[in-house]
Image (tube, rainbow, N blue to C red):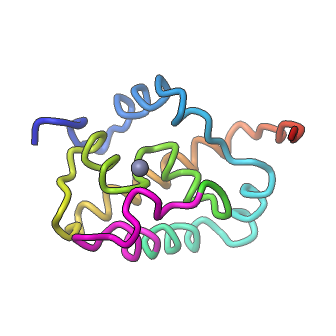
């Protein structure tokens, strides 16, 4: 494990690095996603996050790895791109989680924690959605 950021419960360093990535910092929750989170409740969103990670990232050889996380459609998908937990290459590069082997339960827990942390940050203060352009 020579790449990536040391795993810790304090995500300040990680989130500082992520904010310096133009690609990562492009992602934000819009009114649609925030309304969805409020309707479902944060506990359910966390369950979704677990389910997505289990299905799409946890296998040793995930299906369509590199393209398994849509760019929209669920707050967790946005969170995954924003936090570099979208595919096994990003997990390796940013989080020092090696490829080619199934994710361990502590790794899945760590990924879900990052996703939920980002979602929490995004919800406050509330930012009105920008006017969509073509
Ligand atoms: Zn990725």
The front one of 51 and 9 is: 51
- Residue 63: percent from left, percent from top: 37, 72
Q: Is residue 14 magenta?
A: no
Left or right, 33 with respect to 71, comes to right
Q: Residue furthest top?
A: 20
Considering only vertical position in the picture, is 72 above or below 46?
above
The front one of 84 and 33 is: 84
Residue at 37% of width from left, 74% of height from top? 54
Residue at 27% of width from left, 44% of height from top? 95
Left or right, 106 with respect to 87, comes to left
Q: Residue furthest left?
A: 1
Considering only vertical position in the picture, is 12 above or below 85?
above
Location of residue 4 (image quadrant): top left
Residue at 75% of width from left, 69% of height from top? 39
* Total numbered labels: 0
The front one of 47 and 94 is: 94
Left or right, 72 with respect to 111, comes to right
Residue at 66% of width from left, 42% of height from top? 28
Q: Quadrant of the C terminus?
A: top right
Q: Is residue 67 magenta?
A: yes
- Residue 80: percent from left, percent from top: 48, 52
Magenta stretch mostly in which secondary structure?
A: loop
Q: Quadrant of the N terminus?
A: top left
Q: Which residues are magenta?
A: 52-70
- Residue 44: percent from left, percent from top: 58, 74
- Residue 104: percent from left, percent from top: 20, 68
């Amino acid at each position: 494990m020579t790449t990536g950021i040391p795993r810790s419960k304090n995500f300040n360093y990680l989130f500082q690095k992520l904010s310096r990535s133009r690609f990562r910092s492009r992602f934000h929750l819009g009114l649609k996603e925030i309304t969805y989170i409020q309707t479902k409740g944060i506990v359910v969103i966390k369950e979704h996050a677990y389910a997505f990670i289990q299905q799409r990232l946890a296998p040793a050889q995930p299906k369509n790895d590199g393209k398994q996380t849509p760019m929209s459609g669920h707050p967790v998908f946005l969170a995954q791109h924003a936090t570099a937990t979208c595919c096994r290459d990003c997990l390796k590069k940013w989080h020092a989680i090696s490829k080619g082997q199934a994710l361990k339960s502590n790794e899945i827990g760590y990924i879900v924690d990052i996703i939920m942390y980002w979602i929490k940050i995004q919800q406050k203060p509330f930012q009105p959605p920008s006017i969509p352009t073509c």
